[in-house]
Amino acid sequence: MVTLHSGRQSGEPVIEKLLTQEDILSSYEVVSKLYPCLPSLSLWRAWEHAAYRCGKLPQPVLDVGCGDGQFFRFLWPDVQAVIGVDHDPRVVEAARQSGVYEEVHVSSAERIPVAPESMRSAFANCSLEHMDRLPDVLRSVYRSLRPGSPFWLSVVTDNFVEWRTLPLLARELQEPRLVATLDEGYNKYHHLVNSLAPNAWRARLEEAGFHVREHIPIVPELTSRLFLFVDQLWHLPRPSGETGDRLRAYLLSLPRFDEAFRQILAGVMAMEPHWNLGSGAVFLAERPI
């Protein structure tokens, strides 16, 4: 399903595309092989994979908040000319070892060390919500791109906070201190500083000079609540590591877990009433000519 909305600055329509259950399940089948027995990660990445499936990244590509490069290569196997940027030296070393990137820079994203107008596309997968000084980051990405270049990005929205399940259970148990502890710990783990409504994300992009072409809502409410329950539980700290270390060891012992979890995901999505509302969003923006 496709609907049109007016852009704030350009006056041109923003295309809203809705994914289908079939889109997500077919993406989950391939993504879960990359992340076996990691249910929350496979779930979220399945939505991103489905949203990017028809996208293109002209080369050279700038990968903002690149991580280790594993998901980039999975999404864009034919892209060879790509430059990565990440603030974490340990992650950058893993990215360099991956063979995905021509160059990887240890740098904050508001000072991307590439020449102005030297890149033909940019990509930021689930990274902008973790970045301080978001306006500076977006302006830095804009400067790096040639006119007419696309910028594909995925982000979390305000519903990523609103739809959390573990704090809701703690609230129902009348444990306000536990609610605060769970939320503070999860935000700290993700360094979540930008959980904006979709309209606010579009506004930030347009303030930086971009035209927003497409908006794809990802992970609607019931699927989000499943994701957030598993993910927040997974990342609860333990004296050594996190709860997910034990959970994954157990899931690995179960026969055909990922295949069975696909059935759970299918059942949850079958009940979704509002596919146009998500705890995440994928945008296609463009530096105008």
Image (cartoon, grey):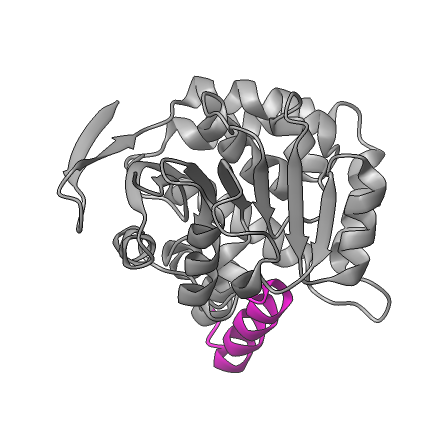
Could you say where residue 246 lies in the image, as x and y percent from the top left? 82, 52
Q: What is the quadrant of the C terminus in the image?
A: top left
Q: Is residue 234 above or below residue 222?
A: below
Which quarter of the image is occupied by the N terminus? top left
- What residue is at 79 percent from the left and 67 percent from the top? 238
Q: Residue at x 72, y 30 (%)?
A: 34
As for residue 140 lying within the magenta part, the answer is: no
**Residue 254, position in %: x, y?**
80, 31
In this view, 176 is above or below 129:
below
The rendered magenta stretch, by its main secondary structure, is classed as helix
Q: Which one is in front, 183 or 179? A: 183
Q: How many marks?
A: 0
Which range of residues does the magenta coloring cover?
173-191
78 on left or right of 263: right
Indicate the quadrant where residue 21 lies: top left
Location of residue 77 with respect to 134 vertically, above or below:
above
Quarter of image, res 27: top right
Residue 150 visible here: yes
Q: Whole-percent x and y of residue 263?
A: 56, 24
Q: Residue at x 80, y 35 (%)?
A: 99
* Residue 210 locus on image (x, y percent): 32, 48
